[in-house]
Amino acid sequence: MNELIAPPLPFDMKPRAREAVRDLKLQQFVGSATHLKDIHRGGIFDRDFGHDYDALRTVARDTKQHALDHLDELLEQFIANARASGATVHAATTGAEACEIALRIARAHGALSCVKSKSMVTEEIGLLPAFEAAGIKTLETDLGEFILQIDGDAPSHIVTPMIHKDRVATAQSFVRELGARYTEDPTELTMIAREHMRGLYRAADIGVSGANFLLADEGAAVICTNEGNFDLSVGGPPVHIVFVGIEKLIRGARDLAPFLKLLARSGTAQPLTVYTSFVRGPRRAGEHGGPKELHFVLVDAGRVGVLASEKRDLLRCIRCGACLNACPVYRKVGGHSYGSMYAGPIGAVLTPELERAQAGGGAGLANYADLPRASSLCGACYEVCPVKIDIPKFLLHDRARLRERGLSPKSEGAMLRLWRWLAERPMLFRLAIGAARLHARLLGQKDGSRAWLRAAPGPGAGWTQSRDLGMPTGERFRDWFATHAAKRDTKRGAR
Amino acid sequence: MTAPHEKSRDEVANNANERTDDGDRAIDALLARVRAAVSAQPVTVAEVPSHAVVRRIANDASDLAGLFETQATAVGMRVTRVHGNQVGGPSTLDAEIAQTLARLIDSHAGTTGRAVVAVKDRELARIAECAAGARLASNTDDDLLFGCAVGITDVDAAIAESGSLVVSTNYRIRNAWITPPIHIALVRESQVLADLVDLFESRQDALDAASTTIITGPSKTADIEGVLVTGVHGPAAVEIVLVA
């Protein structure tokens, strides 16, 4: 497994975050790309749904929650209907089991080469390392994933996996790994990748993909791509395996429209992804093309545990990536700082929860103690979530658990106790604030009309290591309020 | 799931029954665990909510073909409308479709490029094959799609609201719409549905095939620095012939 998304545990976020903040290129790419995506997302919803946007999200939230609340029935229906259409259905409790199932299928066909379209769950279960160890050469066909693969890099965003990389890095790896001529033109680079892969699609023994939705009524999977790589990887090889987390189930196509309308708009500000592909069983008699065998591997890998917990809501996530784009922390630290294929706000709650569900007991938070704190609790993630997952609520929940189990830094507890003690004593509180103000004035450096604190003393130093702290200017709110209250009273008296 | 043990390839291939038993046990175990997990928390949503708000376009939108044309163009496809009453043009609708197709094939495939015809509608198939003429690829060759310059298909439906094409493997060569660098789609105005919701609610037959794809634009990527590039794996251009 790539250590970037499967680090040694317990995971320490701080060194990675520190490195990311110092990486000027990353700051530029990730910061501006996510900011733009977030603006475009808002724009397309305004244009297309206006005031109905919130109602649409409520429909999606309740539809998915209903599916989770009835997941046992939907699973049974899916399995029966998928089998009826000629597919084989497998169940895997762990990632290792899912890989073992795939290896058995591959061995039965003597498969040596595989074309794979982008899938988060295959990253999660470590399919590629398992295939490589068994001598099965796998090609990532999504352009971004392909570039990461040949570079030994790992995805840092759910939807745009190589958001942290630029054209120069791409050009260099194409020269090095593909023997291509050097070009930095994105169109030329894309065409080099296209030509490289076309032959491999035809020659591959096996195709692998994830799925965005599973339809119980139809026994089918729905896969959304913009590039068309899924259709090519399912169309060529004689065997195709769909790996899918059980939380992707919905009742059927009758419930699909709200999710499709939200998914691409939330992720990339498109009305729909270019290709929305339905796979329903293997090639039928008389058909030209398509796999002769279709396998679904239903993956648990902690999901059943999440389903049983008070964090069931997390399984509503449709992996649109909107919360990553909206998050001020993700924008600064990038995806690799989260030590998981699930970065950003959703990753900060999902990663420890999946770990808890699989490793049991306190392993989840103990191994990812930094993640619940990697948030300003500004609530932007909740505001943009198409299925209304209250991520800040769960982050707070996790922080409380960290406190209870003594996993918070001692200084945090001491600070909070001091704050509480002061807040209960108004006189002292006013004095302390006054002293802090004076202190800040003396240390702050004037820059135009504002003053900045460049190096804070004592425990505050951590804050100013990578940014300046804006100093309070003008009068205190207390003074302002007192003046205005007096004016208001005078006015009232005059009336 | 029982502990996996080492087996030779032949043993595995010949032991389909045993595998199925293993698989059944694993599925039963998963179902049992999911049942327990579902009942561990209260049901919070008793009924799936109405989808009325999901539909953006009223059923009575007066000009669905026009809306489809606008939206398909907005996502980067090109639309040519054929009415059969072109001044100075061919005398019949069929002849005008054939002429339009021939022109599109010429402009994209040159004189040597081959065209694959994957059209379910018999009438349209005949016209498309005529238009392709000598460039028509024989579909006995398994490798034919990768050698073609143009893929011609009809559709199961089209969607006005998003400007999408719905194409299934039902009586069509799979991926004829995605493998060649150019896709030409024949759409009859009567096939245009108002909204995605209509496809899922009233055209279940379109999802009956082994594979169905809703196409909304040419193949796209913006993976390299967010620069939009078309034609990464699928076609760089989609031409729609919208027939009255």
Image (spheres, rainbow, N blue to C red):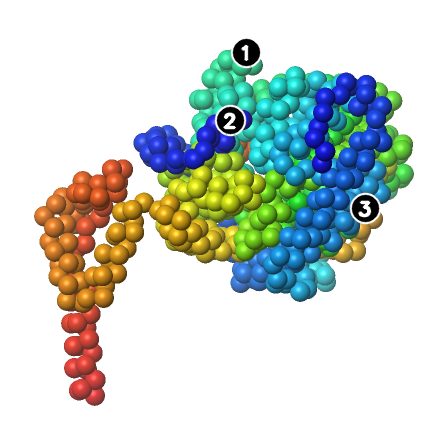
The image shows residue B115, relative to residue A396, as above or below, that is above
Q: Quadrant of the N terminus of chain A?
A: top right
Q: Is any atom of residue A104 visible in this view?
A: yes
Q: Which residue is mark 3?
A: A80
Q: Is label 3 in a helix, a strand or a loop? A: helix
Quarter-of-image position of residue A366: top left
- Nearer the N terminus, badge 3 or badge 1? 3
Q: Is label 2 in a helix, a strand or a loop? A: loop
Q: Residue at x 20, y 64 (%)?
A: A477
Q: Residue at x 23, y 56 (%)?
A: A418
- Amino acid type at circle 3 is Ala
Q: How many other residues sit within 10 Å of disc 3, few (<14), some (14-19) or many (≥20)?
A: some
The image shows residue B164, relative to residue A188, as above or below, that is below
Chain of residue at mark 2: A
Q: Are marks 3 and 1 on the same chain?
A: yes
| Image mark count | 3
Q: Which residue is mark 1?
A: A179
Q: Report x, y in % for residue A288.
A: 84, 29
Q: Report x, y in % for residue A415.
A: 25, 52
Q: Are marks 2 and 1 on the same chain?
A: yes
Q: Residue at x 21, y 88 (%)?
A: A495
Chain of residue at mark 1: A
- Amino acid type at circle 2 is Asn
Q: Report x, y in % for residue A155.
A: 51, 32
